[in-house]
Image: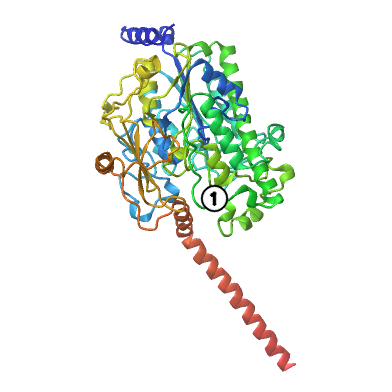
Amino acid sequence: MKLAHVLALAAALLALPGLPAEAQDARPNIVLILIDDVGFSDLGAYGSEIATPNIDALAARGALFSNFHASPICAPSRAMLMTGVDSHLAGVGNLPESLPREHRGEPGYLGHLADDVVTVASRLQAAGYRTTMAGKWHLGHEEPHMLPPAHGFDRSFALDASGADNWEKRPYLPIYDDAPWFEDGAPADLPEDFYSSKFIVDKTIEYLDGNEADDRPFFSYLAFQANHIPVQAPRAFVDKYIGVYDKGWHALRQSRFEGVVERGLVPGNTALGPMPEGLKEWDALTAKEKEIRAMNMAVHAGMLEAMDHHVGRFVEHLKQTGDYGNTIFFVLSDNGPEPNDPLATPGFAQWLWWVGYSRDLDRLGEKGTFAFIGPEFANAGGAPGSFFKLYAGEGGARVPFIVAGEGVPAATRHGFSFITDIAPTILDLAGVTPAREFAGRQVKEMTGRSLLPMLRGDAASPYSDEDAVGMEAAGNVALFRDGYKLMRNLPPYGDTEWYLYNLTDDPGETKDMKEAEPERFAAMMREYEAYAASVGALEVPAGYEQMKQLTVNRLHGMRGQLVAAALVAAGILGGLVWLSLLGIRRLRRG
């Protein structure tokens, strides 16, 4: 059945009074798969050497997007994905953990979804859909109204942190005291055989099978931890990639670039984007350093393949239950590849030792180990774009996006689209109109636009040449219009300068056009300022660096603990001094 016919039938059925439940099956099931920190060229369908056959199969039968963008930071992307509203209007303009103190309490930086935005899950739930969620939430848990049950999910098992261990319930950074998992809004523990990708699929199947008698369509959100730090995977998936990355990141970046070009995802005359200043040269490393870096990348590849394996399990389950044919799949990454090297943070290596994490190469990826790929391999994963996660370069913001299902024509879609477009597209598929009033209150209008005309081939993009789409995350900004991009990135890898790129001809961002096209540059600067004012995007304080701010915030939050520890230490020291003096006096008397 054609996509247009599915929508027309769904709309007609929904308009009928007294509609029996089984008649609503014409509305498609929706599966939203969010991958964490996976770059534009990390999936096999996008030119990677990593085996992702199940996601590739979805791409082969559906729409593969070559010019889709998200925020370069996870929490803002997730807020926009869930609501279809700009991240600042949704209340999550930055990573809550790295928010500068000057922004705290401002409407665009609440750190959780604002009261006047509605998630796609809430709207689908109100329209009669069954709704499930499993995986990383990261949109607030300090109050019950921040968790998934208050945002439209009938069943949920959610992690509300930037990340966590993939093998057990433990934090992955010293900024967290625990890994905050919640089932249906209540604190929850994990099973003994937990592995994040397997568990997320198992829980989703459990929730869907728990309502077998319910014939209503479903919306399932699978928010994988793969491939966020710590990079971990079963050795059966890791071993096949040992030796694959021994030539280093320059060779990988070139091969990924060639794969993207071969698949027609960028023009054949595209220039490969530059590596940011300050990154290491592969040939300058010692043999041992090369072995360590290559092994970490092998774990990264194994983790992505393991996730794809479990996606395949879920697809097979839907085929067995008869739901596959009426299911539309959305697959995307929340931002580009993770560049952080935690060992560069003073004290982190000691923390790893203190909590029992190993970096032993013989078992790297397994339970109790901690791997990461670093900025150089992350830069390769974003090829052909520049930069990586956290930064507004194409390597941080241009991500893979696939839509597949009955009625979605197999094609590569080259027009610009943005992460806020997914929620209105899902609602359009379900025949749901996003009204400005919901549950008796006025709510913000979606800033995203439905991609259905683009999926049908009726439009190249949901945006015209006159439409400007802005983005701001931790002071790194971009504005897109008419194939051009205005961009600024902050240190440590940015230089605070503004640049203008013609993404149509130069997706690698190699040629700054602001001198050649000063009028366009000036106009887009004005448009960015108007965008920032309209959504409440604030300038960060001078000298702000996101990862440094994260550490500062944690130390500030621990101030009471540190004072108490200092007092205890002072007391112990004082006691030892007193005992010493007492001993000396006794010796003198003797």
How would you rate the neighbour count of disc 1 (Cα within 10 Å): few for under 14, some for 14-19, many for 20 or more? few
Image position, residue 45 (x, y; %): 55, 24
Q: Is residue 518 left or right of residue 175?
A: left
Q: Which of 280 and 337 is in front in this view?
A: 280
Q: Which of 89 and 250 is in front in this view?
A: 250
- The amino acid type, in three-letter code, at marker 1 is Leu
Image position, residue 294 (x, y; %): 66, 42
Circle 1 sits on which residue? 279
**Residue at 38% across / 17% down in the picture?**
430
Image position, residue 528 (x, y; %): 28, 41
**Residue at 53% across / 70% down in the picture?**
567
**Rendered view: 306 above or below 349:** above
- Tell me the SS state at disc 1: loop
| Residue 377 picture quarter | top right
Residue 176 visible here: yes
Image position, residue 46 (x, y; %): 53, 27
**Rendered view: 68 above or below 110:** above
Q: In this view, does 7 lie to the left or right of 262?
A: left
**Rendered view: 341 above or below 224:** below
Q: Which of 425 and 64 is in front in this view?
A: 64
| Residue 4 picture quarter | top left
**Residue at 54% across / 46% down in the picture?**
375
Q: Nearer the viewer, residue 563 or 81?
A: 81
